[in-house]
Amino acid sequence: MKISGVRSDLVALPADEPLANAAENPEGTRPIVTLQVQTDDGVTGLGVTYFGGALSGTLRSAVDELGALIVGDDPLRVEAVVAKLRAAAGSAGPGGIFHLALSALDTALWDIRGKALNLPLWKLLGGARERVPTYASGALMRGLSLDRVVRAAATLKDKGFREMKTQLALPGETTPAKEVERVRRVREAIGPDIKLMCDINQRWRVEQAIDIGRRVEDAGVGLFWLEDVTTADDFAGLARVTAALSTPVAGGEYVWGIVPFRHMVEARSVDIVMIDLVRVGGITQWMKVAGMAEAFNLPVVSHLIPEVHVHLIGAVPNGLTVEYMPWLMRLFEEVPQPQDGELAMPTAPGLGLKFDHAAINRYRAA
C-alpha cells in the first residue's frame, strides 16, 4: 500500500453550542482544516486540525506541503513518515503550524492503519475498555451571564450528563467572592453527585489560583478538577498550586509535543494530564504522553475532538474521561453520542468516521 495523494479543505463552522444552546459567540465561526489521505488500495484516512486563527489558510498550506512529501510512502509505517516530516520541517518545529499540520496527517495515517487491519482504532491501540465516561463542555463559559450558566447547567443534567465543566477567571470587574459565588450557584443547580470541573485557561497568577482555589474548597463546591490555573509552561508555579490545594489540578492542553510533558510530570505540576491531539502532534505522540503519564501514576484526559479522543481514552489503562465538546460534529455523517454520561467505543474500522461532504461544501471558506 502506498500513499497516492492528499486533499485538504478549509471550512468555517458556526460557533454554536449544541448541548444547551448556550453559545458564547453565536455569530462567530471556527476555521477548521479537513484532510483526506488517499492510497493506491482505495483506503482513505481522515484528519482534522485547527487553532490556526487568522493563519488558518497558512495551516492548510502546511498540511498540503507536508502531505505532498509523503506521496509514495507506506502509510502503515507511521513512525517513519513522522520522522521524515520532522526532518523535512527543519527548524520550523516543534510547535506552532508544523505540529498542527503534522497532527492531521498523523491522525489520517492511523485511520488508514485501522481500516487496513479491519480494526477500530481503540482496539488497535490497546482496547482497555468498551465504554468511557464523558463530560459536557462548552456550555458553561465565562462570557455568559450567571443566570444563563445556571440554566445551562440544569439542562446538561436533564440530558443525562454526569460530568460537566464550567469556567472561572471571569471577564470584566471581578472579585474572589464573585468567582466563588458563580461556581457555587452552578453546583446548587446540578446537585452534589455530578462531577464538576472548572477551567481557568491560564488566566490566574499563582497566588490567585491558590487563594481562589482554597476559597472554592472552603465553600464546599467539591470540584473534580481545576484546569490550567496559570501559565502552562510555568511548571514550578503549577506545582506550587497543586501542592497547596486538595482539589486535583489538570493541565497540558497548551503543551506542544512530548518533551514539555516530561518537564511537567517530573515537576509534579499536575495531578491530571490533559493531552490535546492537535498541539501534541497527532495520535502517535498522544499515546507516548499517555504512557509517560502512566509511568508517573497519573490519569490522562482529552481536549476537544471527542470523535477521535473516544478511541484514545478508551485505548489506554489510565484514560479518565473524554471532553464532549462537539464543535466539529457537523463535519461528519455520524459521531459518537453520549448515553447516560458515557460513550460506547465505535465498532467500524479506523476512526469510524465519514466526512459529510455536503456540509464541507456548505461551510467551505472563501
Image (spheres, helix red, strand yellow):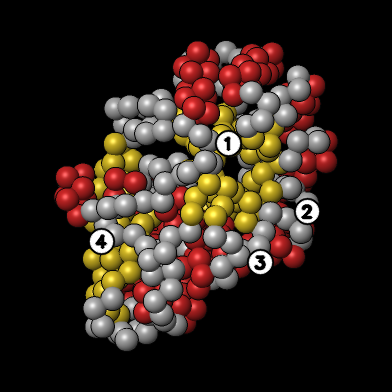
Residue shown at 62%/56% (left/top)? 319
Residue shown at 35%/84% (left/top)? 73
Residue shown at 37%/79% (left/top)? 116
Q: Which mark is residue 182?
A: none
* Residue 15 drawn above or below residue 342: above
Q: Which mark is residue 162?
A: 1
Residue labelled with disc 3: 291
Residue labelled with disc 4: 8
Counting residues from the start of the chain, the first of labels 2 and 3 encountered is 2
Counting residues from the start of the chain, the first of labels 3 and 4 encountered is 4
Q: Determine whether, in the image, residue 9 is placed left or right of residue 187.
A: left
State which mark lies toward you, 1 or 3.
1
Location of residue 263 in the rendering, given as x and y in whole percent from the top left corner: 71, 58
- Label 1 sits on a secondary structure element that is loop
Location of residue 298 in the rendering, given as x and y in whole percent from the top left corner: 73, 55
Q: Name, please, the residue furthest toward the front.
A: 340
> How far, Cα to Cα, is label 2 from label 3?
17 Å
Q: Quadrant of residue 8?
A: bottom left
CA neighbours of label 1 inside 10 A, class few (<14), some (14 to 19), many (20+): many
> How far, Cα to Cα, is label 3 from label 4?
31 Å
Counting residues from the start of the chain, the first of labels 1 and 3 encountered is 1
The answer to whether the residues at label 2 and label 4 have Cβ atoms under 8 Å apart is: no
Q: Name, please, the residue furthest toward the right.
A: 244
Q: Determine whether, in the image, residue 274 is placed left or right of residue 357.
A: right
CA neighbours of label 2 inside 10 A, class few (<14), some (14 to 19), many (20+): some
Q: Quadrant of residue 195?
A: top right
The answer to whether the residues at label 2 and label 3 have Cβ atoms under 8 Å apart is: no
* Residue 177 drawn above or below residue 97: above
Counting residues from the start of the chain, the first of labels 2 and 4 encountered is 4
Residue shown at 43%/73% (left/top)? 119
Q: Determine whether, in the image, residue 277 is placed left or right of residue 348.
A: right
